Structures are given as structure tokens and as C-alpha cells.
Image (cartoon, rainbow, N blue to C red):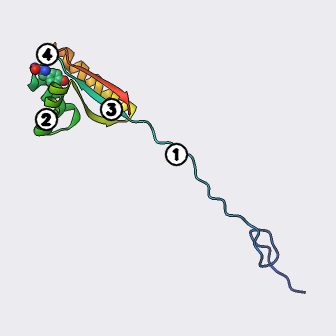
Amino acid sequence: MIIQPITAAGNADDTDDSVVVEVRPETRKPPLYKVLLLNDDYTPMEFVVLILERFFGLNHAQSFEIMLTVHKKGLAVVGVFSHEIAETKVGQVMDFARRHQHPLQCTMEKE
Ligand code: TYC
């Protein structure tokens, strides 16, 4: 008599009935949010440039360009972030503008 070891699949011979099932855990990407800056007639251009440099990590040239886009077109996307980061940026901008008594508006919208 030939004694064969029981395999992991439970077969006492060379056949393997096991089925490989690929498990793909659900990894839904979190939604992203655009942060928008709105134009107005009163906020000084330099103040908007300062905001873009300070809160969005843009250099002076990038900040000036985005500020001009907002000035000409009425609004521009200044960045795309997770909900929490977008909310923080909007809060920082609105707070800073209010403290300096400028009517600048900043909002977020789902991408
Ligand atoms: N329109 C403003 C001005 O002429 C400048 C400005 C730019 C204001 C961008 C807001 O988000 C803004 N002083």
C-alpha cells in the first residue's frame, strides 16, 4: 500500500480541486472637491495674490496668473482636494478676508 500525504486541498493524490479566488477588496476613491475663488470689485489684487501664495502654496507668478483669471472670468479653480482639506482652505481664505474686511468669496464644489 502507498501512503500519500493529505495535501492542503485535502486530496490524497496529485489532483488539485482547489480554486484560486482573487479577492479584490472594494477600494472606492474618496470624492475630490474643487476650491473656487470668486471675483468682486473691491478686494485688492495684491491681497488675492497673497492668499494664493499663503494658503495654496503657489509661487508669485502662478498666484498672479490665477488672480488675473478670476478678475477677467469671474472665477477660477485654485486647487482640488479631499473634502476635509478643501473645507479647511475655504475656511482659511474666508477667515483671512473677513479679518481684513475684504468681501472676497471662496467656495468648494464636488468634482
Ligand atoms: N476684481 C478685483 C479688483 O479689480 C481683483 C480680484 C481678483 C478680486 C480676484 C477678487 O478673487 C478675486 N481689485
Few, some or many residues within 10 Å of mark 2 (<14, 14–19, 20+): few
Tell me the amino acid under the disc marked 2: Glu
* Mark carried by residue 34: 3
Of pointers 3 and 2, the one earlier in the residue sequence:
3
The residue to which callout 2 is attached is: 65
Where's the C terminus, which quadrant? Answer: top left
Q: CA distance from mark 1 to mark 3?
A: 22 Å
Of pointers 2 and 1, the one earlier in the residue sequence:
1
Of pointers 3 and 4, the one earlier in the residue sequence:
3
| Mark in the foreground, 4 or 1 | 4
The residue to which callout 1 is attached is: 27
Few, some or many residues within 10 Å of mark 4 (<14, 14–19, 20+): few
Is the CB atom of the residue marked by disc 4 within 8 angstroms of ligand 1's nearest atom?
Answer: yes
* Residue 40: x %, y % from top left: 17, 17
Few, some or many residues within 10 Å of mark 1 (<14, 14–19, 20+): few
Q: Residue at x 74, y 69 (%)?
A: 8
Q: Image check: 79 left or right of 64? A: right
* Residue 62: x %, y % from top left: 15, 38
Few, some or many residues within 10 Å of mark 3 (<14, 14–19, 20+): some
Q: Residue at x 56, y 46 (%)?
A: 26
The residue to which callout 4 is attached is: 41
Q: CA distance from mark 3 to mark 4?
A: 23 Å
Q: CA distance from mark 3 to mark 2?
A: 18 Å
Q: CA distance from mark 4 to mark 1?
A: 45 Å
* Residue 100: x %, y % from top left: 15, 16
Tell me the amino acid under the disc marked 4: Asp
Q: Residue furthest bottom?
A: 1
Q: Quadrant of residue 7?
A: bottom right
Tell me the amino acid under the disc marked 1: Thr
